[in-house]
Amino acid sequence: MNRENPSARESRRLNRLFAVALARVAEVAAGPAQAVAAGQTVLHAGATPVALPRVASGRLHAVVHLGDEGQRVVPVSFDAGEIAMCSHLFSQEPLTADIVAACDTVVHWLPRSAVELAVATHPELALPLVQFLAQRLREVQARERVWLQRGVRARLWAVLLREIDGQEPAADGMWTVPMTHEDLAERSGVSRPKMSEALKQLEREGVLRLGRRAITVIRR
């Protein structure tokens, strides 16, 4: 039974529509394929990308930073055939989102300048582009509201589960996440005191074990 959110389905439909239309433009030829390992960051927040990754296989996540508070929404996914972009990527400012491989992924890079030239040269691409960006913005805003309404434990746990997603446990059946407490606080949008309290409670419950620069997930 398909339980996918109708909004997510519409977002994927618009993404593929634009990707197919763009692929027909000779000026926008995909570059060489690049294999990306699960968990690897393809584009970092703070960068100004000159090319956009188009997913050949696998899946990418866009993890969006929410301003000065250092909070993030849960990932927005890009599947095979889709171009990993949101409105941030067409800004002259540095990125405010990380593009991360959710699993082993193969991408082709499309020069951003060629994308912009294609839209300018072929006006018919403008409508699906605007529809796509509007849909992605609505999706990000909805996820942001849900994320901010979550409790502290739920936010911390969501970040940790995302880090071990797709990874096999070690021989002892556990997962080690190389992350400082400061990193975890920033990614989850939780203050250090609240985060420390929640982590200690989870450790007492036997869910995880705290280390100097790593957190060991004992059970999911």
Image (cartoon, helix red, strand yellow):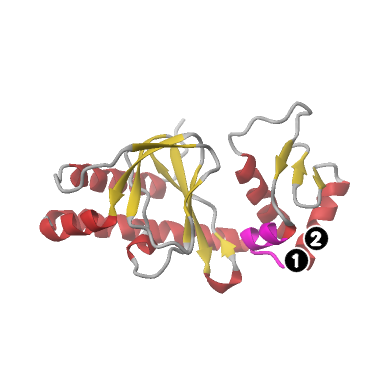
Report x, y in % for residue 155.
66, 55
> Mark 2 falls on what kind of element?
helix
The amino acid on which the numbered mark 2 sits, given as a three-letter code, is Ser
Q: How many marks?
A: 2
Query: Contact, CB < 8 Å: mark 2 with mark 1?
Result: yes
Residue 112 placement (x, y as % from top left): 28, 56
Residue furthest toward the top? Answer: 171
Residue 85 % position (x, y): 36, 54
Q: Is residue 184 magenta?
A: yes
Determine the residue located farthest toward the bottom in the rendered image.
68
Residue denoted by label 1: 192
* Extent of the magenta region: 182-191
Real-space Cα separation, disc 2 to disc 1, in angstroms = 6 Å
Q: Residue at x 34, y 67 (%)?
A: 91
- Residue name at image x 20 percent, y 47 percent: 28
Q: Which corner quadrant of the image does residue 161 belong to?
A: top right
Q: Is 141 positioned to the left or the right of 117 in the image?
A: right
The answer to whether residue 205 is left or right of residue 105 is right
Our reading of the magenta stretch's main secondary structure is helix
The residue beneath circle 2 is 196
Quick one: label 2, few (<14), some, or many (20+) residues within 10 Å? some
Q: Is 153 on the left or on the right of 62, as rendered?
A: right
